[in-house]
Image (tube, rainbow, N blue to C red):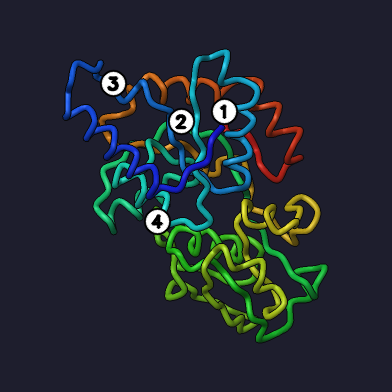
């Protein structure tokens, strides 16, 4: 496995194109002769990809290159501009929101895993003890904010208007018996916010990265069964038949990867296949 900055990847592609344009009798390379560059969040996505790279890729003939991103915006930017071939960090609802806002033309592949959102606190051990007027931090992107609000509602902390399939927003809070002060913060910063708020709703990958155990430390977790927020690989539309992408999909949905997820994350990350 090699790690490469998206800008460097773009430069490499440009150089290869320039060399091929010069001709000179050299053999023309197809995209499928190059390493498959996949952008991923460090935990658990890049860890799962490293397992694939270390244990499965060589035998399958897959040359995998993992590019790590620490936010939820740049992986789609890099995929759209061709710096990477695929990304593995997002859910269908988040992808749909991004496509609507940025005009991306992407294709989602098959679900790989679920990371349940959890409610965490540095000062409480029971949600029932959440004081009146407490500050609760949630992710600031619309998809994960909606998931967070639904988790608060599922634990009887707020009630929400019926928004159908649309993600609820803070404007859809109909009942707030504890007068909670809901504060939206960039998802990656939520673990750090725990010292400043009474509770925070944190994405599973950022919780794990901050040494929080969703199974042990969360005061409440999303239900896994029937959860539409599975994480999956996303590619540019029209590239889903790339042989390298098909190989990666097969490996990510193997029994070996299922066992790795179950044994490594002990319920904090759940296979979705």
Task: Estimate the x, y position of residue 206 in percent, counting from the top left.
Answer: 63, 56
**Picture residue at 29% right of the left edge, 59% below the top:** 101
Instruction: Give the structural element (helix, strand or loop) at label 4.
Output: loop
The CA distance from mark 3 to mark 2 is 29 Å
The CA distance from mark 2 to mark 4 is 24 Å
Question: Which residue bears the numbered disc 3?
Answer: 29
The CA distance from mark 1 to mark 4 is 26 Å
Q: Nearer the viewer, residue 196 or 151?
A: 196
The quarter in which the N terminus is drawn is: top right
Q: Is residue 235 left or right of residue 216?
A: left
Q: Which of the two labelled residues, at mark 3 and mark 2, occupies the earlier sequence position?
A: 3
Whether tag 2 and tag 4 are in contact, CB under 8 A, the answer is no
Mark 1: give few (<14), some (14-19) or many (20+) Cα within 10 Å.
Answer: some
Whether tag 1 and tag 2 are in contact, CB under 8 A, the answer is yes
Mark 4: give few (<14), some (14-19) or many (20+) Cα within 10 Å.
Answer: few
Q: Is residue 69 left or right of residue 6?
A: right
Which is in the foreground here, disc 3 or disc 2?
3
One can see residue 73 in this view: yes
Question: Which residue bears the numbered disc 2?
Answer: 110
Q: Which of the two labelled residues, at mark 1 and mark 2, occupies the earlier sequence position?
A: 2
């Amino acid at each position: 496995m090699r790690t490469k900055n998206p800008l460097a990847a773009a430069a490499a592609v440009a150089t290869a194109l320039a060399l091929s344009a010069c001709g000179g009798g050299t053999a023309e390379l197809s995209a499928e002769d190059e390493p498959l560059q996949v952008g991923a969040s460090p935990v658990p996505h890049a860890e799962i990809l490293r397992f694939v790279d270390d244990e499965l890729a060589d035998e399958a003939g897959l040359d995998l290159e993992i590019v790590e991103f620490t936010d939820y915006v740049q992986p789609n930017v890099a995929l759209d501009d061709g710096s990477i071939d695929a990304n593995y960090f997002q859910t269908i609802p988040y992808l749909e929101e991004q496509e609507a806002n940025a005009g991306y033309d992407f294709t989602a592949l098959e679900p790989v895993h679920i990371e349940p959102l959890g409610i965490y606190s540095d000062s409480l051990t029971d949600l029932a003890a959440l004081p009146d007027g407490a500050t609760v931090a949630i992710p600031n992107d619309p998809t994960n904010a909606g998931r967070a609000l639904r988790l608060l509602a599922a634990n009887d902390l707020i009630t929400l208007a019926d928004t159908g399939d649309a993600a609820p927003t803070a404007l859809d809070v109909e009942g707030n018996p504890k007068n909670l002060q809901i504060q939206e913060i960039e998802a990656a910063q939520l673990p750090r916010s725990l010292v400043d708020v009474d509770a925070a709703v944190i994405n599973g990958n950022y919780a794990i990265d901050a040494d929080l155990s969703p199974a042990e430390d969360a005061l409440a977790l999303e239900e896994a069964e029937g959860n539409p927020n599975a994480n999956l690989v996303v590619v540019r539309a029209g590239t889903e038949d790339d042989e390298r992408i098909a190989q990666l999909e097969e490996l990510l949905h193997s029994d070996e990867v299922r066992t790795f997820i179950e044994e490594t994350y002990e319920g904090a990350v759940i296979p979705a296949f």
